[in-house]
Amino acid sequence: MPTLLSDLERKILDYMVHYLRTNTYQPSIREIGEKFEIKSTKTVSEHLRALADKGYLERDPSRSRGVRILGVDLAAQTVSVPCYGAFPDDRSGFKSDGVEGYYSLDRRMAGAKGSYFVRARDEGLAPLGVEPGDFLLVEPASAGAARDGDLVVARMSGAPELYEYRRRGSTHLLRPSRNGDAPIELGDAEDLDITGRVVGLFRSFEQTAVPVSATTH
C-alpha cells in the first residue's frame, strides 16, 4: 500500500505532475518553492526527499530538475484513478489513505474529478449485482444528484456503504447490499448522507486479473 502523504506533499506531487504534463520537463526546486511560498530551497529538497523515501519519486540531487515521478501515466489523454479495497471515508482525507494502487483511464471514462475505484472482494455486494473482482468507478455526488435506480455510496450507520437508491413519491429508499437487511426509508432528502454514486463497472469475463495495470501514484 502506498505510504500516506501529508497535505503539502500531495500538493507538491500534484503540482509536479501538472507542470510536467504542461511543459514536458520538471519544475526546478526554486519554482516549487515559489509556488508554495517556501523560501528555503533546503526545505523544498526535504519535501522531495520525503516523496522519494515514500516511493513516489526518484531523485538526482546533482541536477536542478533531476526528478523522475514514479508510477504516473503522463499521457495527456489519460488520468490516474485511485483504487481502494473498501469504500473510503471522505471525512478522514481519503485521497492517499487506503489506496491499493492507481489505474490509468481515458479521461472520457474516468468520471468527474475526485472519482475513485473500489474493488469488490467477496459476495457482500451480490444483492446489488456486483460480483467479486468487479471494479466500481465512483464519482463524488450529493443526495440531490441521486437518480432512481442509482448505486450510491452513503453513510447511514457509520462507515460508507453501497446502496441502491429508489424514489417513491416524496419517500427516499436505500436498499442495502447485505441480504436480509431491510431498506432504509427516509422522508426528507436532507437525511441522506450520500457521498458518491457508481458511474461505471469494470468486469473481467475471464478467470484472470483485470487487464489494466496498476501504478503507485
Image: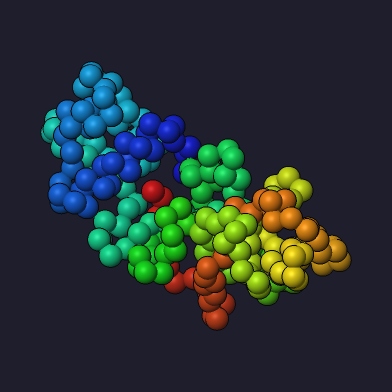
Q: Is 42 drawn above or below residue 15 in the view shown?
A: above
Colour scheme employed for the rendering of this structure: rainbow
**Quadrant hosting residue 6:** top left
Point 30% across, 24% down: residue: 46
Point 38% across, 31% down: residue: 8
Residue extending furthest toward the bottom: 205
Which residue is nearer to you in this view: 100 or 184? 184
Residue extending furthest toward the front: 170
Q: Is 80 drawn above or below residue 210 in the view shown?
A: above
* Residue 150 falls left or right of residue 79: right
Question: Residue 49, how many percent across, how many down?
Answer: 31, 29
Point 52% across, 55% down: residue: 140
Q: Is residue 108 visible?
A: yes
Which residue is nearer to you in this view: 2 or 82? 82
Point 22% across, 52% down: residue: 21
Q: Is residue 117 visible?
A: no
* Residue 30 falls left or right of residue 36: left
